[in-house]
Image (cartoon, rainbow, N blue to C red):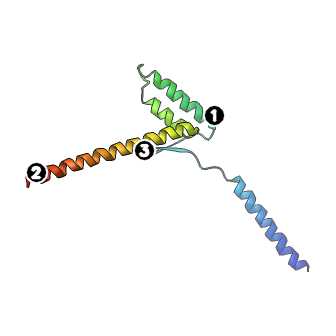
Amino acid sequence: METSGKPKKAVRNMKNQQDHVIHEQKPAPRVIRLFGKEIPLPQSRGLRIAIGVGLCFLGLLGFLPVLGFWMIPLGILVLSYEFAMVRRFRRRLIVWWERRRRRGAAVGQAKTDKSLSDRV
């Protein structure tokens, strides 16, 4: 009877070790993908928010040397990883931009098709 109890205990210990290992895993690092490059963000949520707000605020001073208006969209991008409202705004902007780009590509394709048919 004792031999049958040992495997159960060993299995139970192995399950506890697996649970322990699962809980020790760190969350995946947050990364901003921009123009094919990955820029890592800090793990601290407060620091990410401070960076996003700082970029937006300093972007408003873009008329000054060194600073630039390019900092505003970058700050919004950083903040979109933390706040649902900003994330929805970013996604709507992306959808709008893609529709506009595809519509422009379709119009450009229609113009080239029409010009080709006029030559024949």
In the rendered image, which residue does mark 3 sit on? 95
> Which element type, helix, strand or loop, lies under badge 2?
helix
Res 49 quadrant in image: top right
In the rendered image, which residue does mark 1 sit on? 46
Q: Nearer the viewer, mark 2 or mark 1?
A: 2
Residue contact at pointers 2 and 3, CB within 8 angstroms: no
The x and y percentages for residue 67 are 44, 24
In the rendered image, which residue does mark 2 sit on? 118
* Residue type highlighted by circle 3: Val
The x and y percentages for residue 83 are 58, 38
Q: 86 or 106, which lies in front?
A: 106
> Which element type, helix, strand or loop, lies under badge 3?
helix
* Residue type highlighted by circle 1: Gly
Name the residue rendered at 46%, 41% in the picture: 92
Residue 54 versus residue 28 in the image, above or below: above
Instruction: Report the number of numbered marks.
Output: 3
Name the residue rendered at 45%, 33% in the picture: 73
Give the mark nearest the N terminus, 2 or 3: 3
* Residue type highlighted by circle 2: Asp
Check disc 3: other Cα within 10 Å, few if <14, some if 14-19, many if 20+: few
Name the residue rendered at 48%, 39% in the picture: 90
Left or right: where 62 falls relative to 19: left
In the image, farthest residue toward the right: 1
Q: Nearer the viewer, mark 1 or mark 3?
A: 3
C-alpha distance separating marks 2 and 3: 34 Å
C-alpha distance separating marks 1 and 3: 29 Å
Residue contact at pointers 1 and 3, CB within 8 angstroms: no
C-alpha distance separating marks 2 and 1: 61 Å
